[in-house]
Image (spheres, grey):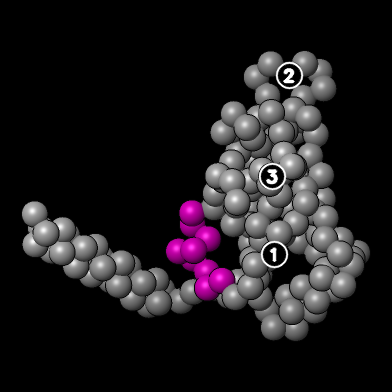
Amino acid sequence: MTADLVRNRRALHDYHVLETWEAGVCLLGTEVKSLRAGRGQLQDAYVDVVAGELWLRQAHISPYEFGTFTNHEPLRPRKLLLHKAEIRKLASKVDRKGYTLIPLAMYLNEKGKVKLRIALCEGKQARSKKEALKEREAKREMDRVRKGARE
């Protein structure tokens, strides 16, 4: 897989990721150019199921600086492309169990198409965020000690 164009770093901090999918995104030309220039943001974004279709909402892609009157709206909803069976499966899980669909990353696949990695997530409680932070700090400290022992 190639490098991410845009990444949602807060998602792994705020949610437990249960499953992930790769979805196509309907983008305009100026949006793709802006993403390649690193001008996108997924921090507040979420995926919504409307009438059997998936929509990416609140994803900010800055207007392309060399665009003309054909430039895009930065926060416009963008349609996601998945098979109908997958969409139905996701919609039932979101409705029934109260999970959330969160975008994790936008990237270019091998053919140069922009793809979105979406995840079925469950919100973390404040105490589990603290526990994850403690685990991360303990791991960093152990890595520092190991590195110091090697030198």
Q: Earlier in the sequence, mark 1 or mark 3?
A: 1
Residue type, mark 3 in image: Glu
The part of the image, by quadrant, that contains residue 63 is top right
Separation of marks 1 and 3 at Cα, in angstroms: 17 Å
Q: Which residue is drawn at 33% across and 75% down?
A: 131
Separation of marks 2 and 1 at Cα, in angstroms: 32 Å
Residue 18 placement (x, y as % from top left): 60, 75
The residue wearing badge 3 is: 110
Marks 2 and 3: which is nearer the front? Answer: 3
Say few, some or many: other residues with alpha carbon within 10 Å of mark 1 (under 14 / 14 to 19 / 20 or more).
few
Q: What element carries label 3?
A: loop
Does 132 appear above or below 115?
below
Q: Earlier in the sequence, mark 2 or mark 1?
A: 1
The residue wearing badge 2 is: 67
Q: Is residue 11 magenta?
A: yes
Marks 1 and 3: which is nearer the front? Answer: 3
The residue wearing badge 1 is: 21
Horizontal arrangement in the rendering, residue 85 relative to residue 73 (left or right)? right
Which numbered disc covers residue 35?
none
Separation of marks 2 and 3 at Cα, in angstroms: 26 Å
Residue type, mark 1 in image: Trp
Say few, some or many: other residues with alpha carbon within 10 Å of mark 3 (under 14 / 14 to 19 / 20 or more).
few
Which residues fall within the magenta stretch? Answer: 9-17
Q: Is residue 36 magenta?
A: no
Residue 20 placement (x, y as % from top left): 65, 67
